[in-house]
């Protein structure tokens, strides 16, 4: 066999977080353990019926949708997106020039890095973060300046801590609120204004990854960055169908913003793909134009699960607080467990109890000392999950 080496940038990356977790999960299944999987943020509930029906009908009766689509998204899809953005956020976007369809926002974020960055450019990335925010940068050979998300700062980055010399060399800043993995939300909208001001000052593309804007609890409202003045000059916003409509496997999302800022990604993707299949985009239209009751019900489901887990974890001495959004619990390990790494705890939890969680370190250095639990199993299973955590925690007392 010839010895052909993979690219240096790819070789430098460790295996993707979930590769390791999936291996452990497989071993647990092989041992016939009753696995409860709270690892990946992979929604357990099905895609709403009207969306599935739209897909089936389209693929069966509209054969022209089997052809190559338009790379930037078919007009109907782009129109549905801009109308949804107006209804939802009161934001006006031009469907022809200010929105681009994606094969999931993960694809778009990775390719955005490739379309904007050169070797040596800096990117401002939160730590912890959704992994593509840093892996996308590393794959291009650009440099990362991590902005720590600390509990004492409500898991928001402190822009004043970014050295001027780094800010000057930075090309992109990634922000994601409601946040994966910390489940933090932005409560003081001045944060967004500060971010916009900072990025304008240093000529940085501000990327708001808004994958969880619809999964919020109580009266908390997650805005679009375009609700803030001057954001259009400097920001792009990514959206995903995966969590909002339980369409994670459908691979559909969009990015929106000013034509000039979108253009590099549109150009890049024109060489690479043809966009999501037309029948998937049309199902996306059904999702956006249909009743949003399903989404509100889904948020309530996650809120109920979150409360159950937070209450149970607290009872076992874990220091966790209720959240205002997302589908995650970001749990600080109890003091007695902190002698071990989050990876070791996650490994033991799977091996000993069959409970799959994500080790905080997988999301960045500042994720050490935490584990993330995705609220993606049947409501009844959280009781079992808590019993297992309770028993596991007792070993440390
Ligand atoms: C913050 C964040 N952005 C983007 C994504 C990816 O979404 P998509 O399924 O649209 O690629 C995820 C998925 O977990 C996420 O947590």
Image (tube, rainbow, N blue to C red):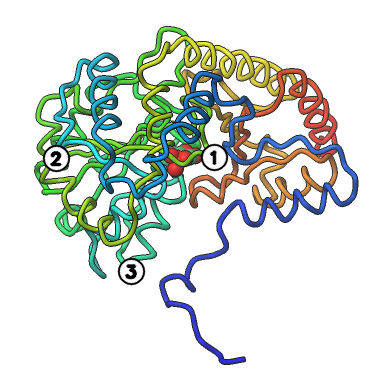
**Marks 1 and 3, how far apart at CA:** 29 Å
On screen, residue 309 versus residue 208, left or right, reads right
Badge 3 element: loop
Q: Earlier in the sequence, mark 1 or mark 2?
A: 2
Residue under numbered circle 2: 234
Badge 2 element: loop
Crowding at mark 1 (Cα within 10 Å: few <14, some 14-19, many 20+): few
Q: Earlier in the sequence, mark 1 or mark 3?
A: 3
Badge 1 element: helix
Mark nearest the camera among 1 and 2 is: 1
On screen, residue 305 versus residue 230, left or right, reads right
The x, y position of residue 368, in whole percent, is 56, 47
Name the residue: 48% across, 25% down.
245
On screen, residue 105 versus residue 384, left or right, reads left
Residue 348 appears in the picture as rendered = yes
Residue under numbered circle 1: 249
Whether label 2 lies within 8 Å of ligand 1 gets the answer no
The N terminus: image quadrant: bottom right
Residue under numbered circle 3: 141
Q: Earlier in the sequence, mark 2 or mark 3?
A: 3
């Amino acid at each position: 066999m010839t010895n052909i080496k993979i690219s240096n940038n790819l070789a430098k990356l460790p295996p993707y977080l979930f590769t390791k977790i999936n291996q452990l999960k497989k071993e647990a299944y092989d041992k016939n353990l009753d696995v409860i999987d709270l690892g990946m943020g992979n929604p357990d509930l099905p895609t709403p019926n009207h969306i599935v029906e739209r897909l089936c009908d389209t693929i069966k009766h509209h054969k022209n949708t089997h052809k190559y689509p338009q790379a930037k998204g078919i007009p109907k899809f782009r129109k549905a997106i801009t109308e949804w953005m107006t209804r939802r956020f009161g934001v006006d976007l031009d469907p022809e020039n200010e929105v681009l369809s994606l094969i999931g926002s993960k694809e778009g974020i990775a390719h955005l890095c490739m379309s904007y960055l050169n070797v040596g450019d800096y990117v401002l990335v939160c730590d912890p973060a959704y992994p593509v925010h840093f892996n996308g940068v590393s794959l291009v050979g650009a440099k990362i300046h991590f902005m720590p998300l600390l509990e004492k700062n409500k898991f928001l980055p402190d822009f004043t801590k970014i050295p001027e010399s780094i800010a000057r060399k930075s090309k992109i800043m990634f922000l994601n609120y409601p946040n994966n993995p910390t489940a933090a939300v932005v409560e003081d909208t001045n944060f967004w204004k500060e971010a916009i001001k900072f990025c304008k000052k240093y000529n940085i593309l501000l990327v708001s990854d808004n994958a969880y804007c619809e999964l919020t609890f109580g009266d908390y409202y997650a805005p679009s960055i375009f609700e803030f003045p001057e954001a259009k000059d400097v920001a792009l916003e990514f959206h995903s169908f995966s969590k909002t409509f339980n369409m994670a496997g459908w691979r559909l999302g969009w990015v929106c913003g000013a034509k000039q800022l979108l253009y590099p990604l549109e150009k890049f993707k024109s060489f690479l793909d043809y966009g999501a299949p037309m029948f998937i985009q049309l199902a996306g239209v059904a999702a956006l134009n249909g009743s949003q009751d399903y989404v509100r019900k889904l948020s309530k489901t996650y809120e109920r699960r979150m409360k159950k887990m937070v209450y149970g974890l607290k009872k076992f001495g874990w220091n966790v607080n209720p959240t205002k959004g997302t589908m995650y619990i970001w749990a600080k390990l109890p003091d007695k467990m902190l002698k071990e790494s989050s990876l070791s705890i996650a490994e033991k939890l799977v091996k000993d109890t069959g409970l799959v969680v994500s080790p905080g370190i997988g999301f960045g250095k500042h994720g050490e000392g935490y584990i993330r639990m995705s609220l993606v199993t049947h409501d009844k299973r959280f009781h079992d999950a808590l019993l297992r955590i309770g028993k596991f925690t007792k070993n440390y007392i």
